[in-house]
Image (spheres, rainbow, N blue to C red):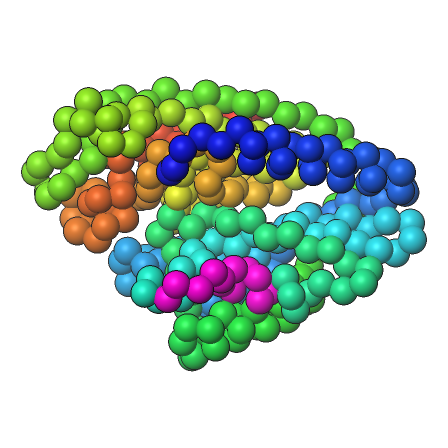
Amino acid sequence: MGNYNPQWVEFASQNITNAIQTIEKDLKESKIAYWQSDAHEYAENRLVKNAPHDGILRGIKLVRSDSSTAQLITFSAHATNISKHDKNLSGDYPAALIDSLNSATQFNMFMAGMVGSHRLAGIHATEYDAIAEAGSVLSHKIQQASISNVQDSVAVFARHIPIRFGSSQLRISKNWKLRDWVFRWLVNPLQGELTYLQLNDIVMIGTPCDFSGEVYVNHIAEIAAQQNKEVIITSFNGDYAGYITEDAHYETEKKEEVMTLNWVGPHYGNYFAEMINKLLSK
């Protein structure tokens, strides 16, 4: 939201370019590995109690020849643990997690996983104490992670796959929705793409939405295992098309994730799962 700011774009792009040029002067041979750790007790499905949820911490680890490391971390609990009435700027639990892991020789980065219907669980504190506790327990889980497929060379394959959307379906009650031209005027036309990056047998897929881990558990995990691929799916890639949740909830749940924040209508959980499974099967 907000007006286009070309000065900000120029500022950001120039700083990224400068950083890349600095990095290129300090390249070292490295090894890459996939890792994961079971943290199911710290995530839950916030749409339906005891419904399937994704609770795996996943990531990629790079180890350089000088022993310094970099690590990408994903988790499917939505970082929405500070009251909406709090006006302070906060990185929520991902910031606490990164702070607990970073050191002089280790760099860590967090990306939102399949957060479309998930929240933190198993945390006894609230507000800022909760994010500190979550950062601590998840850091411990990562330090116990199982590492697999350590390799010293990488085959890189990348694609951008446009997604075809129908008319918007933003509901204001169960049987009433905004007309598509009103949605386009208020927000933007529905648009987006799947971003596909494969590093050996590690597959990263970025989705333009709040993508639900329940969809992954019910429709994608088995295919990923059959294809012997380590799959990392993230939300909020590029454009934004609302919430993509399990289709079974569309007619039965009144929570805002399904009612107000689903902008695409029914059947899109299966639609996204089918697209992702076809990519994994190639």
- Residue 119 or 54: which is nearer the viewer? 119
Residue 168: x and y, percent?
24, 28
Q: Within the image, what quadrant is residue 157 found in?
A: top right
Kindly give the residue lying farthest to the left in the view shown.
175
Vertically, is 201 above or below 116?
Answer: above
Q: Within the image, what quadrant is residue 2 found in?
A: top left
Residue 87: x and y, percent?
39, 63
Q: Residue at x 51, y 64 (%)?
A: 93
Q: Residue at x 39, y 56 (%)?
A: 118
| Quadrant (top left, top right, bottom left, bottom right) of the N terminus | top left
- Residue 236 or 20: which is nearer the viewer? 20
- Residue 187 or 100: which is nearer the viewer? 187
Would residue 225 be visible to someone looking at this image? Answer: no
Residue 252: x and y, percent?
16, 48
Residue 146 located within the stretch drawn in magenta: no
- Residue 37 or 209: which is nearer the viewer? 209
Would residue 73 be visible to someone looking at this image? Answer: yes
| Magenta segment | 86-97
User: Relative to 218, is 31 on the left or the right?
Assistant: right
Residue 96 located within the stretch drawn in magenta: yes
